[in-house]
Amino acid sequence: MLDHARPVALLIARIAIGAIFLVHGYQKFAKMGIAGTTKFFESVGIPLAGLAAPGVAALEVVGGLAMILGAALPVVGTLLAINMVGAIVFVHGASGFSADGGGYEFVMALAAASLAIGFTGGGALALDNRMSRRRRTLIAPA
């Protein structure tokens, strides 16, 4: 029973976590704008804010989509987790743990979920898994 539920559970997790990153990246492009995101990054002391702002926004959009699809999960999961560590260090860490006060609780959960999903293989419904199965089929001896 659990073996049948695992791919669906991983798909739900990938969609939820991927959607959060996708929306936050989109907001950096569309709502705040890259100029506004850069200004915010500068205000919290992020180095090279002019490069970091579009880089983080793109990572969150592309990484969120990749997470949803289950593509390049070890790389995407690691990059998104590193992104969240940066958010803890530069934005949320000084506010303590509780998300109620702007703390790092939610950001830490996103980092942990990104790593967990990234290194589970994403399940049977992940693009990575489907592609590796297809590759094995194509190169299997006749």
Image (spheres, rainbow, N blue to C red):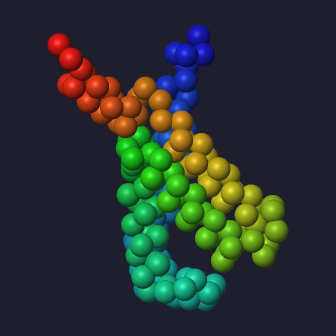
Q: Is residue 40 visible?
A: no
Q: How far across and how far down the image is residue 126, in percent?
A: 40, 34
Q: Which quadrant would the N terminus be assigned to in this image?
A: top right
Q: How far across and how far down the image is residue 63, in percent?
A: 43, 55
Residue under the image location 55 percent in, 65 percent down:
83
Residue under the image location 54 percent in, 36 percent down:
120
Horizontal side, residue 47 vs residue 57: left or right: right
The number of numbered discs placed on residues in the rendered structure image is: 0
Q: Residue furthest front?
A: 141
Residue under the image location 51 percent in, 51 percent down:
77
Q: Is residue 22 visible?
A: yes
Q: Is residue 19 above or below residue 14?
A: below
Q: How far across and how far down the image is residue 45, in percent?
A: 62, 87
Q: Is residue 71 above or below residue 20?
A: above
In terms of depth relative to the viewer, which is nearer, 120 or 125?
120
Q: Which quadrant would the C terminus be assigned to in this image?
A: top left
Horizontal side, residue 91 vs residue 48: left or right: right
Q: Is residue 120 above or below residue 58?
A: above
Q: How far across and how far down the image is residue 74, in percent?
A: 47, 47
In terms of depth relative to the viewer, which is nearer, 61 or 139?
139
Residue under the image location 43 percent in, 63 percent down:
59
